[in-house]
Image (spheres, coloured by chain):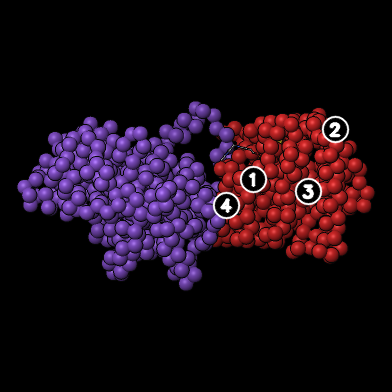
């Protein structure tokens, strides 16, 4: 599917150089088109869109309280449907606003079959407040509240969402915009609750040079640490670059060692990360093969 | 139409008659009957609305915000822990100037676990920018709910309205009441800042201090503007449907030397107390405050004042008594009574007047 030239995220935003979130937002809005309202809880994106009275977005953006995005979207979506409008309602939220404080509202909205698309861009930390750990921060990563490296595993958000059986669920990564675009377009063509989890390699948070955002995303996928897939009506398909990674992967070491946040990761933790990758890929492969 | 039912049922029927497009709700005693009744109306087709059975009160107010942002009429109901749990969203809805209407069944907060009437829940939401009205009968619960939509949605106001009814004392008592057909009494919603796809903008974006300051001032303007809107709405209601309401209700005040002031059901009880005191030769009167926000001060010139608060601001005092004192310089005898549904009879209220001591505070049942 050809990506349109029309821009809804206008040039010059307050994002950091190399920001993955704005990249993702750009493609999400291109796929969604003009008849869309974004619902945004507190996160980096609250800053990226600019300061009143200006806005960097060419669609309506509703900024809401941290825990409330999916619930606000529920009300908005019901109101649009009641008025016979097809307007896309898209929550665009960080990992913290999704996996931690916002999970109750997300769970409720998915369970109620709300007609909306929820996109979690996952930069694996609370970046807006200065890089504290979130439930999505991976094992071994340093943040300002895990200065010795995080001792707990990343929360498995996708498994939690999958348990709600949304009509459409997908992962994507800022480094693969076409894959992301296709998935958003497909998601919005289906009525009901849709969920996408998009990896957002964040230069200041992950501590890598700002021109390496795409490279970092590609390493995540090539190491199998991030798998691109979609689940439509319960049927899982691996997409794009992850098809190759399901068979042959680079070691996670190649991904971890180029990020300052993993400077304190131990050998045992690295081995644990590698094991989690292998387990996840095996589990996803079994699901693809229909053995689960 | 004359009917018979509880305060909760009256609120639900008023909501049905006001025709909201979206209702989002989460149950909590003693409000639950309201949202159950509305769910029934939606199911049997007597109310053509979307009913969103959300997973929490934070989300019920959030869903109302999302719906109201598109320009449609919305309603929710809550009580006590539900109200304070949605506190953040009360600030968000008023700040976003969304005319959401909510019923709150006044109830104590734990611990200890108590479901009795107390105004501490709504009083603690004082500074959120919500209008607050306190009702005293089933009929008033119905009428105030109908009027709340018109007041909230008035383009001079555009602030949310909370209708407060004492838990159990009003939510669960049964009285006859008359419903109305609001028709054009409530004009269609015309939220000027409803989301417009053809004119996209950022809502609630980062706002510099000076502009934020102006927005806050605009909320206060909306509050001030609500006073004439309330007066006009209540006058039109009286004209059309024959029932009169005022900013506050006075009872035998003209020649009174001492007036008792309270809100909610205690405000109704004190009328009987006034009659008792008058029989004893005490020139008593009563003022039932209906609106706590905006705070509308009655004329208390030359009168002694006894204020009964079913609330308390710890480290400070009874809230209504202190706000009255701050606004009009009177020195009330401040009685704290009825917390957690504590029984307070009209005889007790008459006794408060007999033992009054200007400027002092009295905890009923503790200081006796
Ligand atoms: C109730 C509440 N608690 C805390 C905050 C402060 N806060 C704002 S954004 C944020 C972190 C956001 O992290 P995430 O959702 O991962 O998005 P990111 O900033 O990484 O884009 C926090 C803690 C808030 N706005 N509201
Ligand atoms: S901290 Fe990361 S996600 Fe946030 S604006 Fe900067 S680059 Fe983007």
Residue B142 percent across, percent down from the top left: 33, 60
Mark 4–mark 2 distance (CA, rounded to whole Å): 38 Å
Return the residue found at the far top: B210
B232 or B349: nearer the eye?
Answer: B349
Category of crowding for the residue at label 2, using alpha-carbon neighbours closer than 10 angstroms: few (below 14), some (14–19), many (at least 20): some
Residue A78 in sight here: yes
Instruction: Chain letter for red, please.
Output: A
Q: Which residue is mark 2?
A: A258
Q: Is residue A57 left or right of residue B188?
A: right
Label 1 C-beta lies within 8 Å of the nearest ligand 1 atom: yes
Residue drawn at x 45%, y 68% is B41
Residue at the spot 16% in from the left edge and 49% down from the top edge: B350
Q: Chain of mark 3?
A: A
Q: Where is residue B200 shown, x and y percent of the image?
A: 60, 44
Chain letter of disc 2?
A
Q: Is residue B147 left or right of residue A45?
A: left
Chain to which the residue tagged by mark 4 belongs: A
Report the Cα–Cα distance between label 1 and label 3.
20 Å
The residue labelled by disc 3 is A172
In this figure, which residue is indicated by the disc labeled 1? A100
- The residue indicated by pointer 4 is A71
Vertical side of B233 occupied by B326: above or below = above
First in sequence: mark 1 or mark 2? 1
Q: Position of residue A112 (x, y in %)?
A: 60, 61
Q: Nearer the viewer, mark 4 or mark 2?
A: 2
């Amino acid at each position: 599917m050809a990506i349109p030239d029309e821009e809804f995220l206008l040039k010059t935003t307050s994002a950091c150089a190399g920001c993955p979130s704005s990249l993702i937002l750009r493609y999400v809005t291109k796929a969604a088109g003009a008849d869309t309202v974004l619902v945004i809880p507190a996160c980096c994106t609250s800053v990226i869109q600019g300061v009143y009275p200006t806005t960097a977005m060419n669609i309506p953006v509703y900024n809401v309280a941290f825990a409330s995005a999916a619930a606000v979207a529920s009300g908005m979506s019901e109101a649009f449907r009641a008025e016979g409008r097809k307007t896309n309602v898209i929550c665009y939220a960080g990992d913290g606003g999704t996996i931690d404080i916002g999970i109750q509202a997300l769970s409720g909205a998915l369970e109620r079959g709300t007609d909306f698309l929820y996109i979690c861009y996952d930069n694996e930390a609370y970046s807006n407040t200065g890089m504290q750990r979130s439930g999505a921060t991976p094992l071994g990563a340093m943040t300002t509240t895990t200065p010795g490296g995080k001792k707990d595993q990343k929360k498995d958000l996708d498994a939690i969402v999958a348990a709600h059986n949304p009509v459409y669920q997908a992962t994507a990564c800022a480094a693969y915009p076409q894959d992301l675009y296709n998935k958003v377009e497909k998601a919005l063509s289906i009525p009901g609750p849709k969920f996408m989890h998009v990896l957002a390699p964040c230069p200041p948070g992950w501590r890598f040079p700002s021109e390496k955002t795409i490279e970092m995303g590609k390493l995540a996928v090539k190491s199998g640490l991030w798998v691109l897939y979609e689940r439509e009506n319960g049927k899982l398909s691996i997409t794009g670059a992850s098809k190759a990674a399901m068979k042959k992967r680079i070691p996670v070491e190649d991904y971890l060692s180029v990020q300052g946040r993993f400077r304190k990761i131990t050998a045992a933790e690295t081995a644990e990360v590698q094991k989690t990758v292998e387990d996840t890929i095996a589990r996803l492969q079994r699901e693809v093969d229909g053995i689960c | 139409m004359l009917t018979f039912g509880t305060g909760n049922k009256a609120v639900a029927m008023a909501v049905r008659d006001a025709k909201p497009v979206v209702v989002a709700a989460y149950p909590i005693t003693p409000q639950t009957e309201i949202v159950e009744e509305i769910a029934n109306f939606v199911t049997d087709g007597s109310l053509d609305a979307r009913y969103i059975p959300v997973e929490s009160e934070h989300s019920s107010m959030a869903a109302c915000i999302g719906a109201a942002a598109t320009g449609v009429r919305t309603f929710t109901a809550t009580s006590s822990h539900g109200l304070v749990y949605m506190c953040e969203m009360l600030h968000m809805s008023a700040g976003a100037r969304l005319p959401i209407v909510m019923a709150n069944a006044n109830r104590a907060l734990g611990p200890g676990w108590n479901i009795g009437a107390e105004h501490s829940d709504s009083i603690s939401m004082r500074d959120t920018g919500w209008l607050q009205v306190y009702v005293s009968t089933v009929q008033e619960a119905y009428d105030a709910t109908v009027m709340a939509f018109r007041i909230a949605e008035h383009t001079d106001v555009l602030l949310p309205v909370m209708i407060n009814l004492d838990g159990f004392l009003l939510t669960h008592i049964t009285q006859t009441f008359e419903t109305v057909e609001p028709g054009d009494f409530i004009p269609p919603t015309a939220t000027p800042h409803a989301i417009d796809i053809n004119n996209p903008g950022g809502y609630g974006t980062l706002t510099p201090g000076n502009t934020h300051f102006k927005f806050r001032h605009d909320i206060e303007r909306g509050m001030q503007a609500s006073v004439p809107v309330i007066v006009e709405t209540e006058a039109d209601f009286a004209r059309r449907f024959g029932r009169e309401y005022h900013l506050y209700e006075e009872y035998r005040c003209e020649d009174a030397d001492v007036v008792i002031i309270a809100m909610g059901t205690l405000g109704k009880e004190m009328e009987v107390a006034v009659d008792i005191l008058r029989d004893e030769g005490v020139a008593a009167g009563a003022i039932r405050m209906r609106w706590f926000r905006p705070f509308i001060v009655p004329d208390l010139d030359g009168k002694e004042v006894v204020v009964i608060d079913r609330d308390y601001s710890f480290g400070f005092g009874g809230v209504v008594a202190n706000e009255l004192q701050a606004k009009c310089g009177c020195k009330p005898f401040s009685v704290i009574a009825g917390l957690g549904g504590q029984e307070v009879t009209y005889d007790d209220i008459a006794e408060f007047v007999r033992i009054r001591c200007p400027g002092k505070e009295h905890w009923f049942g503790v200081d006796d």
